[in-house]
Image: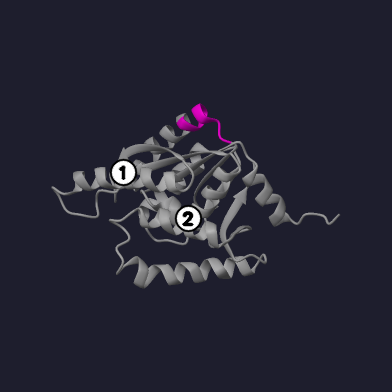
Amino acid sequence: MPVPDDNTKAREKLLTCGSALFIGAHPDDIEFRAGALVCLMRQHGTRVTFAIATRGGRGWPEPIGRPLERIRERQQYTAAGILGGAEVVFFDYPDGSLQAHVEPLAGGLARLIADLRPDVVLSWDPEFIDTTHPDHQAAADATLTAAAGLDVCWYGSTRPNVRIGFDEETLQMKLRAIKAHKTETPWFHFDLRLKKRMIARMRQEGSEIGCDYAEAFRLTLP
């Protein structure tokens, strides 16, 4: 029998865990960066919870921001359902200013972790993040503090060490979940600009491990 390589061991560790907490700065962060992993975890029976730091109301000017938050909340619940029924917990920090609230967010996440006792926590990579959005970095920094001593899997990383492969069916589930965020993915923005690049990236990641597609993460263990 062949000895499993490190990527296979990491994949098995993630897909056989009993519970996972995904942390995002905004509705849609998790679907874009880890939607396939969420789908696979739910298929394996993992309890998945999304913790979303903001309600994403900054995209439109006041006084439209508050109605937009309610719209984006509903979109998040829909997307989580498409991926297999993840639970959703919203915090209420201001979209676009999360970097000013890292400490209280970390405290709230620590309390949520103590309540849920997840086997693994997943969030933006605090050290090697591939985005310049300050809210993403703030969510990463808060997670780093809140999840100290736990197994953490970082998405949006420029230095991944594990790739989770998946097939066309799972890809389509991920795309459906992303498009559930209709305010963020109008056809002229997503279908014409982002979708092709995103799929090409996942194909490239998949080619590294002999799969159709893959999402890449940096897994760190205490």
Quick one: SS at disc 1? helix
Give the alpha-carbon distance from disc 2 to disc 1, as whole Å: 18 Å
Q: If the image is split into quadrants, where does the C terminus sit?
A: top right
| Secondary structure predominantly adopted by residues drawn in magenta | helix
Name the residue at 46% across, 41% down: 85
Q: If the image is split into quadrants, where does the N terminus sit?
A: bottom right
Relative horizontal placement of residue 58, taking residue 190 as reference (left or right):
left
**Percent position of residue 195, x then y:** 41, 68
Quick one: SS at disc 2? helix
Q: How many marks?
A: 2
**Dot 1 crowding, Cα within 10 Å, few <14, some 14–19, many 20+:** some
**Dot 2 crowding, Cα within 10 Å, few <14, some 14–19, many 20+:** some
Q: Is residue 201 above or below residue 163?
A: below
Q: Disc 2 or 1, which lies upstream in sequence?
A: 1
Tell me which corner region of the image, top left, top right, bottom left or bottom right, holds residue 67: top left
What residue is shown with label 2?
A: 173
In the rendered image, is residue 125 in sight? no
**Percent position of residue 192, x then y:** 35, 72
Residue 74 tag number: 1
Q: In the image as oriented, which residue stretches furthest toward the left?
A: 63
Name the residue at 28% across, 44% down: 94
Relative horizontal placement of residue 42, taking residue 64 as reference (left or right):
right
* Pick the front one: 103 or 215: 215
Q: In the image as oriented, which residue stretches furthest toward the top?
A: 115
Name the residue at 35% across, 37% down: 91
Magenta-drawn stretch contains 210: no
Contact between labelled residues 1 and 2, with CB atoms less than 8 Å apart: no
Q: How is the image coloured?
A: one colour
What's the amino acid at mark 2?
A: Met
Magenta part of the chain: 112-118
